[in-house]
Amino acid sequence: MNSGRPTPPRPNDHKTDSSVKGELTYEDKVVQKIIGIALEEIDGLLTVDGGFFSNVKDKLVNNDDVRAGINTEVGKKQVAVDMDIVAEYGTDIEDIFEQMKRVITREVKEMTHLEVIEVNVNVVDVKTREEYEADSETVQDKAMNAADKTGDFASRKTENAKHAMSKGRHKIDEKTEPRVE
């Protein structure tokens, strides 16, 4: 029974891997995603920053795109990486850079067999963790919070109006009942 794993080649198969023609290539976005996920393990790296316009976009909507702010040049055998980052205040930024190079090189090599020949990092800001978390609240988050508060307010006012109408209807019903049988 096949458990979803590829079936290993059988000894009597006539073709070998070297006799099959073809080429393996990677889109930039694939390598960018590998790098983005790998960078999540680095302490002191608050975010990879795509610059002003990316920040505006990220402030408008929640964006879980790990590729944002990572630029790559992917060749047939090599990769070059450029990115802007925000580092955590009080951390050793040189150490963060060295960790980034190690992690990026390891993950790209293990997954794609491409050689990372260059990692360029531009530190665009330093923030405390508290500043970063406060800045990370998006306009979408703020709108949702405002909508929740507005919804609660509207619900209370609607209930008050229903109650007032019910009292008024009861009084009208009392006055419209026939006085005699």
Image (tube, rainbow, N blue to C red):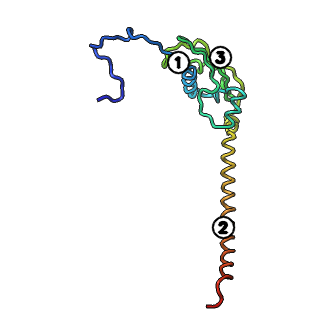
Position of 45 with respect to 16 (left or right) is right
- SS class, disc 1: loop
Q: Are marks 2 and 3 in contact (CB under 8 Å)?
A: no
Sooner in the amino-acid sequence: mark 2 or mark 1: 1
Location of the N terminus (image quadrant): top left
Question: At x 31% / y 28%, what residue is drawn?
Answer: 2
Query: Which is nearer the eye, 132 or 48?
Result: 48
- Frontmost of labels 2 and 3 is 2
Question: At x 52% / y 14%, what residue is drawn?
Answer: 114
- SS class, disc 2: helix
Residue 120: assigned label: 3
- Outermost top residue: 19
Sooner in the amino-acid sequence: mark 2 or mark 3: 3
Q: Are marks 3 and 1 in contact (CB under 8 Å)?
A: no
Q: Which percent across, then down, holds residue 95?
A: 63, 21
- SS class, disc 3: strand
Query: Which is nearer the eye, 25 or 94?
Result: 25
Residue that badge 1 annotates: 26
Residue that badge 2 annotates: 162
**Kind of residue indicated by mark 2:** Lys
**Kind of residue indicated by mark 3:** Asn
